[in-house]
Image: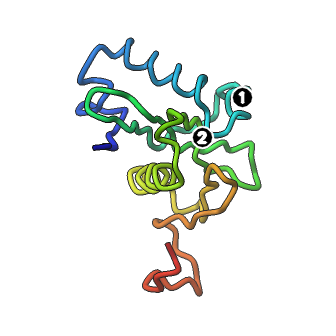
Amino acid sequence: MLEILHAIGPQSWVSAGDPLERREAMQELFFDHPVCPDDTEEDWPEDRELYAEMVVVQGERLVGTAMLVVDPEREDRPARIWGMGILPEFRTDFVIRTLEEALIAAGYLDPAYPFIEATDGMLVPNPYAEMPGFNRADPRAA
């Protein structure tokens, strides 16, 4: 069974083991099995803001990792899912979308950002932003 866990914070997956070893495993997963290979060529800008970081595990095995970040210099779409790495045997649309949804829910993203760019380039509405004319009760709003 797969489980999505927080990667940062006092009760996180990273803090529940050897933090250095677990951080290295997350980084290796991102560089060895990136969902968006272009992400691996990006440096971490000084002004990048990390809103959420999560992992996908199967028991003790790390199978996925990703972050919700804001890059202020990307004026067109500053909020995005970045750094996603998933082992090939677990890389399905369902796992990718579920991890993205978990990051967005956990990130409590600033309402100033109406959309989050998903790994496939689609824009996902920020659930914490108020958008006139956008009815959240509509099931298509997800």
Name the side, left or right, on which 55 lies relative to 60.
Answer: right
Q: Amino acid at mark 1?
A: Glu
- Residue 98 falls in which quadrant of the image? bottom left
Element class at badge 2: strand
Query: Are the residues tagged 2 and 1 within 8 Å (C-beta)?
Result: yes
Pick the quarter of the image with the N terminus. top left
- Residue 76 falls in which quadrant of the image? bottom right
Residue placed farthest to the front in the image? 89
| Residue depicted at 57% across the width and 77% down the height | 131
- Residue nearest the viewer, comparing 97 with 89: 89
| Residue depicted at 60% across the width and 23% down the height | 31
Q: Residues within 10 Å of mark 2 (few under 14, many from 20)?
A: many
Work out whether mark 2 precedes mark 1 in sequence or the reverse, and give the earlier one. 1
What x and y, as percent, mark residue 33? 58, 29
Element class at badge 1: loop
Q: Which mark, by number, is residue 5?
A: none
What x and y, as percent, mark residue 51? 47, 43
Q: Where does label 2 land, which residue? A: 82
Q: CA distance from mark 2 to mark 1?
A: 10 Å
What x and y, as percent, mark residue 89? 49, 37
| Residue depicted at 23% across the width and 24% down the height | 16
Q: Is residue 106 above or below residue 19?
A: below
Q: Where does label 1 land, which residue? A: 42
Name the side, left or right, on which 4 lies relative to 91.
Answer: left
What x and y, as percent, mark residue 92? 52, 49
Q: Amino acid at mark 2?
A: Trp
